[in-house]
Image: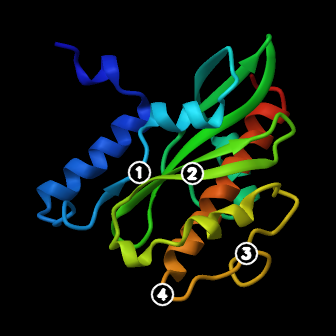
Amino acid sequence: MKSMSEWATSSERLFLGLLAAAVLCGIPIAAQAKVFLSRTEALDLAFPHADRVDSQTYILSAGEAARIEKLSRSPLDSMLVEIYTGFRGGVVSGYAVIDIHNVRTLPEAFMVVLSPAGEVQSLRLLAFHEPLQYRPTDRWYTQFDDKSLAEPLRVGGDVHGVVGATLSARATARGVRRVLAFYEVLIESGRE
């Protein structure tokens, strides 16, 4: 039997750890939790024509972490970042990052897919553990398409709010800004 470290990526281990902590604390997540896509399913949708998808885990330096927090206007929960890179014919077709964070008190996970130039191609909700009435619609998530870090990505500004899901909207905007900052600091700056 495989150990957890043999079959789970760091993102999956974090996600499973959050679920385990919620269960141990007696939070009734089963009644409200919803998993929409697995990591594998999301990567297949992110890179449908890729010959291969590689992943690289980065351990952020203090300077990189500070720069990412400044660019994203959002705190980091971890100094580890896993970035998936899709290739077709040896050419990069895009990047993807799974962002896991708490909305209010429970986690959500989504995958942000970036173009080779660092613009959002898509955002897919993978799991949402808050009550589902606090989940924005699928259409709402599409407003992030073609966005870059050059835009403010601020709820109530260039990002529409969601009545009854303000915390979800803000958490999503922060997560997208974090992913765009990862791209700028780790990919565009040439750390790869």
Q: Which residue is mark 2?
A: 124
Disc 4, SS: loop
At label 3, the amino acid type is: Val
The reply to whether dot 2 and dot 1 touch (C-beta < 8 Å) is yes
The reply to whether dot 2 and dot 4 touch (C-beta < 8 Å) is no
Nearer the camera: disc 2 or disc 3: 2
Spatial separation of the CA atoms under disc 4 and disc 3: 15 Å
Spatial separation of the CA atoms under disc 2 and disc 1: 9 Å
Above or below, 11 against 174 in this view is: above
Q: Which residue is mark 1?
A: 36
109 or 122, which lies in front? Answer: 122
Q: Which mark is residue 18?
A: none
Q: Where residue 171 sits: x, y (%)?
A: 55, 67
Where, quadrant-wise, is the C terminus in this rendering? top right
Mark 4 or mark 1: name the one nearer the start of the chain.
1
189 or 12, which lies in front? Answer: 12
Disc 3, SS: loop
Q: Which residue is mark 4?
A: 164
Q: Where residue 31 sits: x, y (%)?
A: 19, 66
Q: Which residue is mark 3?
A: 159
Where, quadrant-wise, is the N terminus in this rendering? top left
Left or right of 116 in this view: 14:
left
Mark 4 or mark 3: name the one nearer the start of the chain.
3
Q: Is residue 81 visible?
A: no
- Dot 3, how many residues are within 10 Å of its Cα: few (below 14), some (14-19), or many (20+)? some
Q: Quadrant of residue 134?
A: bottom left
